[in-house]
Image (cartoon, rainbow, N blue to C red):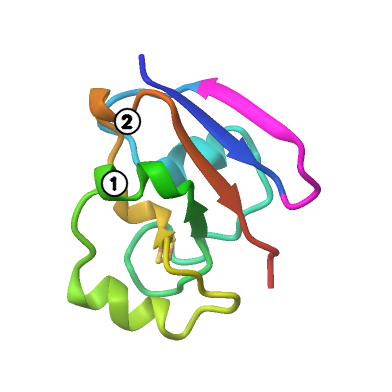
Amino acid sequence: MPKITFIKVDGERVETDAKVGNTVMEVAKELDLPMLAACGGALACATCQVVVDEEWYEKTGEVSEDEEDLLDTAHDLTPTSRLCCQIPITDDLDGLVVSLTPMG
Ligand code: FES
């Protein structure tokens, strides 16, 4: 199983084994990490924003136009921000590091 590391807003690192086929958002919710993900992955809220570690950004795949539009409405946007309900876990993402963003 690919390993994923979440970095919380306070700097705490949470490492986990992630199931291929789940999204990064689903993994975060299973771990009860502080993330709203209000729309449950329907690409309608932008509250699942994470900042992807720079060296992993390309591997997280294409950003759709709809995701880009929603990201434009998100707070604290960075060049490597993604909506993590749009990042499916694959074996290629073994080692992925993402930082959570403040809720609300
Ligand atoms: S959970 Fe709403 S856009 Fe990702």
Task: Identify the image quadrant of the N terminus.
Answer: top left
**Furthest residue in direction top, as rendered:** 1
Judging by the rendered image, the residue that carries numbered circle 2 is 93
Mark 1 or mark 2: whose residue is earlier in sequence: 1
Q: Residue at x 32, y 30 (%)?
A: 93
On screen, residue 20 above or below 34: above
The amino acid on which the numbered mark 2 sits, given as a three-letter code, is Leu
- Residue 61 as seen in the image, left or right of residue 72: left
User: Which disc, if any, is residue 5?
Assistant: none
**Furthest residue in direction right, as rendered:** 10
> Considering the numbered disc 1 on the image, is that residue within a helix, a strand or a loop?
helix
Q: Residue at x 81, y 48 (%)?
A: 10
- Residue 38 as seen in the image, left or right of residue 91: right
Marks 1 and 2 close (CB-CB < 8 Å): yes
Q: Where residue 22 sits in the image (x, y, percent)?
A: 33, 35
On screen, residue 2 above or below 10: above
Q: Where residue 54 sits in the image (x, y, percent)?
A: 43, 49
Q: Where residue 55 sits in the image (x, y, percent)?
A: 39, 43
The amino acid on which the numbered mark 1 sits, given as a three-letter code, is Thr
> Considering the numbered disc 2 on the image, is that residue within a helix, a strand or a loop?
helix
Judge the density around disc 1: few (<14), some (14-19), many (≥20) Cα neighbours within 10 Å: some
Is 85 magenta? The answer is no
Q: Where residue 102 sits in the image (x, y, percent)?
A: 70, 64
Task: Identify the image quadrant of the C terminus.
Answer: bottom right
Segment tinted magenta in the rendering? 9-16
Judge the density around disc 2: few (<14), some (14-19), many (≥20) Cα neighbours within 10 Å: some
Spatial CA span between label 1 and label 2: 7 Å
Is 12 magenta? The answer is yes
* The quarter of the picture showing ligand 1: bottom left
**Furthest residue in direction front, as rendered:** 55
- Quarter of the rendering containing residue 103: bottom right
Judging by the rendered image, the residue that carries numbered circle 1 is 60
